[in-house]
Image (cartoon, rainbow, N blue to C red):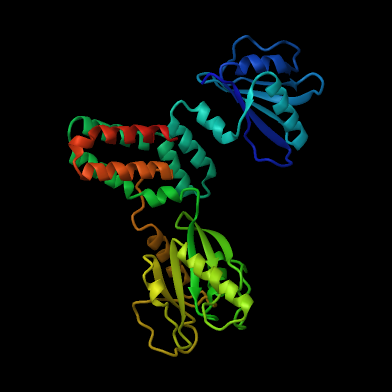
Amino acid sequence: MSETVIALLTPPGKAALATIAVTGPRAWETVRALFHPRSGSALAELPESGQFRLGRLGDAVSEEAVLAVRSIEPILLELHVHGGYEVTRYLLELFAECGDIPVSWQQMLQRYESDSIRGMAANVLACTTTTRTAAIALDQYQGAFRAFLRQTEALIVAGEFERARKVVQDVLRYADVGRHLTAPWRVVIAGAPNVGKSSLVNALAGYHRSVVSPTTGTTRDVVTAQLAIDGWPVEVVDTAGLRVGGEALEEMGIDQACAAVAESDLAIWLVDASAEPVWPDDALHTLRQLRIVVNKIDLPARWGVDEGFLSLSATTGQGVPELVAALGTWLVSDPPPAGAAVPCTNEMIEHLLEAGRLLAGTPAASAEAVLVLLRECGRLG
């Protein structure tokens, strides 16, 4: 890395404190020029790892700051300052005038980490929202995916193409998990009007997220709730009841509902046990991830509910824990064990899919192309 870069690590907005990081060959030189220790003595010519100093930044406008030397090889300095918009803007401009290049915190991580996969994993780790997904990202940061690449390259160089293909396929089992480490799984609750879709969303969320009413067409917009189910980030989507013959505004809601179902990772078709059942049409039946759930089992049954269906009452809560457990299994039937390699970006997944296709064909002739794909995976972070 030939450039010295500076980034705001804390989220934008008003806050008591903000953290600015500087890394690169001129990081210490720049900080020495701008930071004035409260003791009155100048900073040493070389930084010491773990060093903390209280002082001020700048001359024209002097801002109190704490300087922390986080590491020496590579060098990473942090400045803890007041968190107002104008303070951070002024300080970033001050460092830019000295030749440092302002970048985003994501770019900072990429530049600071000498291993691109560690940089990628650090970015993913910073954006995870559950302990389970954070643990998977941390495994990649600590070398799980890099070890997979080295193992696979060694197998190909040794001519063990079938073993290499199996190793690649084993990692691709977790491609969907990798795609959802930061983006939640999308679970859509669909069905006819008044089957209890909004009540079920409220029961899953644990609070009153959707309006519940016996009036047909109450839900007209797509309503979402962010949850964690079995440690996976999940967005549950409440949709308009699917029926024919509603008013224009309701028809718009139905169109949105159909689009939400088509784009979902999992669609729950809710059926009312106390009314004549309305089943999904043939188009919905073709969806790979469609599950039928029966609601309102606390009311007198109108039809013979098949014991093969998961049944519940969104109103009383009966059967809701069983649905939550099932959702975790339906979304991720084969979760990665601790320490497993998981591809965390779409580009990595596409490269591995192509490598798998080549290894399944004529691997000896494609060995060099596969090696290129694997090495590119190592640089995609």
- Residue that appears at 35% across and 80% down: 307
- Residue that appears at 64% across and 37% down: 10
Question: Left or right: 118 with respect to 364?
Answer: right
User: In which image quadrant can residue 266 be found?
Assistant: bottom left
- Residue that appears at 76% across and 20% down: 58
Task: Give whichever of 89, 298 is nearer the camera.
Answer: 89
Horizontal and vertical percent position of residue 229: 47, 59
Q: Which residue is at the far right?
A: 60
Horizontal and vertical percent position of residue 309: 37, 76
Question: Left or right: 144 with respect to 126?
Answer: left
Please say whether residue 106 is visible from this viewpoint: yes
Horizontal and vertical percent position of residue 381: 45, 35
Q: How many marks?
A: 0
Task: Give whichever of 249, 63 is nearer the camera.
Answer: 249
Horizontal and vertical percent position of residue 59: 79, 18
Question: Left or right: 352 with respect to 259?
Answer: left
User: In which image quadrant can residue 140 be found?
Assistant: top left
| Residue 101 in the image: above or below residue 360 | above
Please say whether residue 218 is visible from this viewpoint: no
- Residue that appears at 34% across and 47% down: 337
